[in-house]
Amino acid sequence: MVDDICAIATPYGSGAIAIIRTSGPNAIWLVNQIFRGKDLTKVKGNRIVYGHIVYNNEIIDEVMVSIFRGPKSFDGEDSVEINCHGGVFVTHEILRVLLNSGFRLAEPGEFSKRAFLNHKMDLTEAESIMDIVNAENKLALKSSLNALNSSVHNLVSDFRNDLLDLLAKIEVNIDYPEYDDAVDVTHQYLEPKLSKLLSKMDVVLANSKVSKIVHQGINTAIVGRPNVGKSSLLNMLLDEDKAIVSDIAGTTRDIVEGQVNLDEISLHLLDTAGIRRSDDLIESIGIQKSKETIEKADLVLLVLDVSSELTKEDYELIDLVQNKPHVYVANKSDLAAMWQKDDIIYISAKNRQGLIELKEAIYKVTSLDTFNVNNPSLNNVRQIDLMTKAKAALKNAYYSCQMQVDIALIEIDIKTAFDCLGEITGEAYPDELITALFTKFCLGK
């Protein structure tokens, strides 16, 4: 039997209103036992009722109660949401009363898990709920809302339907070779169909690489030799004086972190110690950490001092970032320029000039200027990893076709791809992994 569960669905702390969510086969009846007002068992679904929460003949709080009847509810079960005053004490007092009245405390993500198990949503739609909650910028929010409206589900389903069609035709050929009306599944028949599916997957994965950046933000390393204005650039982007700024070379000895939203994207900024040869042990450690940060970064902002000649260290850094997405940033443009270079953004961190041009360059180098939330894409590492595995399996099937491998063996790779895609939406996912996934959700979700 399914338990009746409850949890506080609003953030911890005092506020105007708090919401306590309940769900389960007896949720409406149980809440009705502690509610003074209309008989909730007779209230139609999708209605709000005014009354009081009462326990041992003592009024706990004045509330508005929302009634949702399954299957037309978020998780497909009968559900009651209690809107009470947002004080910490009163919220927890109502929760205590619910627990004493037959409910148990919901596990993290249990409401969403029940919605998944009751076929109200698939895994991609469940993940999109948390993506909406965690969205840090406008593009991430739009993309998450798109996924909630089944965009990823439909994308994956189309792939699976194409593969299912191939699998069915192969099975007919193997099991009923005498059936004259069946399509003759040969290597020549399979090869172009697999090639078309692989091309479609390439497009999806390319879009997904950018989509992942939209959702997770861009790990951005600000690098350069000492005293070129890295910390000043960090402070300009953050619009606060987080990093110490000094004319003394080597002031920044460790990684200084910050986060900024540039209109529709998020940058996770890392201001690194100036990279140069140094006999100072502590500074040398900072320089080594800077090089490690460059390797891990999605984007490198290489800061150069346009008011002085480029040095050997500058040229070494230019070579160092060539294999990473990067933007050359010429700082101190308010001073006389000592050199010019193509594809460079001129700024004055001191006077806060050049920020718009820098934003445009970042959009371009990360391909975010081409991102469209309506393009077919996946939204997180789990989904992308499974699509990549499905593509690898189809590649094996494609190469096997070219090598004239037995069709029955090719079918195994196609079935592997079919199952990998099913794991994206949860149609072929082990129970223990389902549980692990939903534990990442917060209480009340």
Image (cartoon, helix red, strand yellow):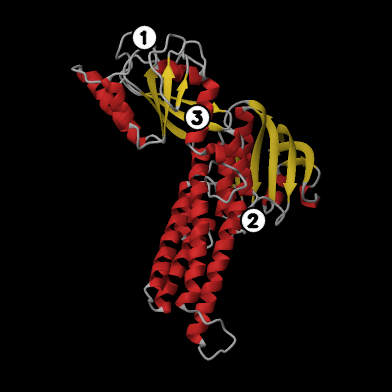
Left or right of residue 339, residue 113 in this image: right
* Circle count: 3
Asked if residue 140 is positioned above or below residue 13 in the image, the reply reads below
Left or right of residue 45, residue 327 in this image: left
**Amino acid at pointer 2:** Lys
* Residue found 37% across the figure and 76% down from its top: 405
Q: Position of residue 226 (x, y in %)?
A: 31, 16
Q: The residue tagged with tag 2: helix, strand or loop?
A: loop
Q: The residue tagged with tag 3: helix, strand or loop?
A: helix
Per the model, the C-alpha gap separating discs 2 and 1 is 57 Å
**Amino acid at pointer 1:** Ser
User: Reading the chain from its start, which is encountered first: label 2 or label 1?
Assistant: 2
278 or 190, nearer to the observer: 190
Specify the farthest residue to the bottom.
178
User: Reading the chain from its start, which is encountered first: label 2 or label 3?
Assistant: 2
Q: Position of residue 104 (x, y in %)?
A: 57, 47
Dividing the picture into quadrants, the one containing residue 249 is top left
Per the model, the C-alpha gap separating discs 3 and 1 is 27 Å
Q: Quick check: can you spot residue 444?
A: no
- Give the quadrant of the N terminus: bottom right
What residue is pinned by disc 3? 361
Q: Are marks 2 and 1 in contact (CB under 8 Å)?
A: no
Q: Which mark is residue 246?
A: 1
Q: Position of residue 110 (x, y in %)?
A: 56, 49
What residue is pinned by disc 2? 120
Left or right of residue 165, residue 317 in this image: left
Which marked residue is nearer to the observer: mark 2 or mark 3? 3
Per the model, the C-alpha gap separating discs 2 and 3 is 42 Å
